[in-house]
Amino acid sequence: MLSALISGLHNAKNAYASWRRRQAAYEELSSLDDRSLADIGIRRSDIPYLFSRDVRDAAAAQATGAVRKEIRRAA
């Protein structure tokens, strides 16, 4: 019982830290002017998409080597 509570607190701490990192990156990108964003190849309207669940899931799948067939064919 105690180990489950400790594990839950550890997971909550990690989730919060991950959210804060994403939030800081989002705020940093949002603070850039349009020219700086263009220099790194994104538009202001791309910022919310970059932090969406779909992008995180695709990045995680690619990191583990579980790239979907559609992505491989497109590359």
Image: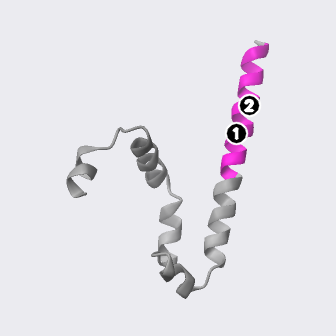
Question: Dividing the picture into quarters, in which one does residue 1 lie?
Answer: top right
- Image location of residue 75, percent across then percent down: 25, 57
Residue at 50% x, 81% y is 39
> Looking at the picture, does residue 28 appear above or below residue 56?
below
Residue drawn at point x = 72 percent, y = 45 percent = 16
Mark 2: secondary structure: helix
Residue 45, percent across and down? Answer: 48, 75
Residue 15, magenta (yes or no): yes
Query: Residue 30, position in %: x, y?
Result: 62, 75
Which residue is situated farthest in the left direction here?
A: 73
Vertical position of residue 64 compared to residue 72: above or below: above
Q: Which residue is mark 2?
A: 10
Is residue 72 toward the left or the right of residue 24 in the image? left
Disc 2: CA contacts within 10 A as few (<14), some (14-19) or many (>=20):
few
Residue at position x 67%, y 51% in the image: 19
Q: Which residue lies most toward the top here?
A: 1
Asked whether the residues under the numbered discs 1 and 2 touch, taking CB atoms below 8 Å apart as contact, a structural biologist would say: yes
**Rendered view: 35 above or below 49:** below
Mark 1 nearby-residue class (10 Å; few <14, some 14–19, many ≥20): few
Which labelled disc corresponds to residue 14? 1
Q: Amino acid at mark 2?
A: His
Residue 29, picture quadrant = bottom right
For the residue marked with disc 1, what is the amino acid? Asn
Q: What is the CA distance from the residue labelled 1 to the residue labelled 2?
A: 6 Å
Per the rendered image, the range of residues in magenta is 2-19
